[in-house]
Image (spheres, helix red, strand yellow):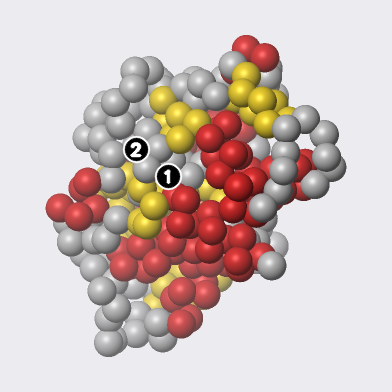
Amino acid sequence: MKTQNPINILVTGAQGQLGRDVMAVLQRRGHHAVGTDIADLDITSAQAVRDKLIGLRPDAVIHCAAYTAVDAAEDDESLCRKVNVDGTENIARACGELGCKLIYISTDYVFGGGGTQPWKPEDPAGEPLNVYGRSKLDGELAIQANTDRYCIVRISWAFGEHGRNFVSTMLRLGAQGKPLSVVNDQVGSPTYTADLAELLADMAETDRYGVYHAANEGYCSWYEFAREIFALAGMQVDLRPVTSDAYPVKARRPRNSRLNTDKLVANGFQKLPPWQDAVERYLEAIQ
């Protein structure tokens, strides 16, 4: 789904785990990609955002910038909302004014996480368990109120080569040779940012707007995720499953983070490869 005609694309959060992969994909495809991060664009300033977009006149904005410290957000709700809600609204308004498409990265945390059925894009969100999830949901609402040309892409359990994540943490802890306890009652789908970046580029090249779910195919618990990481890495680790109650954190996490990705295929996009394959490629990439 690679276009022959280069387009102008602005990427926020371009120095982040996902943003760096998005920039690499766009540049490889021959697009004119401009990356911004907190040092050169304060998305919480409506004027700064408007000035940047007027100056660049992008065809699309891929909005990766976000406050993602889930536990810290419980103690700093104001900053979390300033970035994830106000900042997103500023971008959505500017995109609506200029008529450029907006691709927004959201999260499975917009759901309450009950049951065992995979969440569909059309399922009603509105019962987030934590401040971060509420802020991302309100970011979605801000987009829908300010522009019609958007793709909202909900992802889960992201990992990539350019940041700290569950896989890198497991590899670091596993190398210490101590027993590890990992939660076994939260189920979801890992999302490899290198694979997600290809999909986001596809979306920037099309006009197939709407709310989507995107994650690597298949479901697992965090414990099963860790077990596969160690198996693929050839590491012998004493891994023990525990319940969420045994691993208290400040922000509640959903037990059910399964995402139904069928809408991708229905709208002409490709699903992401199985998560086990993604982990294997990630391990090869970081070696």
> Is residue 38 left or right of 117 when viewed as pictured?
right
Pick the residue in front: 167 or 119.
Answer: 167
Q: Residue at x 46, y 74 (%)?
A: 25
Rendered image quadrant of residue 4:
bottom left
Asked if labels 2 and 1 touch by Cβ distance under 8 angstroms, the answer is yes
Q: Quadrant of the N terminus?
A: bottom left
Q: Is residue 6 visible?
A: yes
Above or below, 285 against 92 in this view is: below
Q: Nearer the viewer, residue 218 or 90?
A: 218
Q: Is residue 192 above or below residue 100?
A: above
Residue at the spot of label 1 = 155
User: What distance separates the C-alpha of mark 1 from that of mark 2?
Assistant: 8 Å
Side of 21 relative to 266 (left or right)? right
Q: Residue at the spot x=42%, y=45% of the render? A: 155
Q: Residue at x 82, y 34 (%)?
A: 178
Residue type at numbered disc 2: Leu
Which quadrant holds the C terminus?
Answer: bottom right
* Amino acid type at image mark 1: Ile
**Label 1 or label 2, whichever comes before in sequence order:** 1
Which residue is under mark 2? 259
| Residue nearest the viewer, comparing 138 with 242 | 242
Helix, strand or loop under label 2: loop
Disc 2 crowd rating (10 Å Cα; few below 14, some 14-19, many 20+) is: many
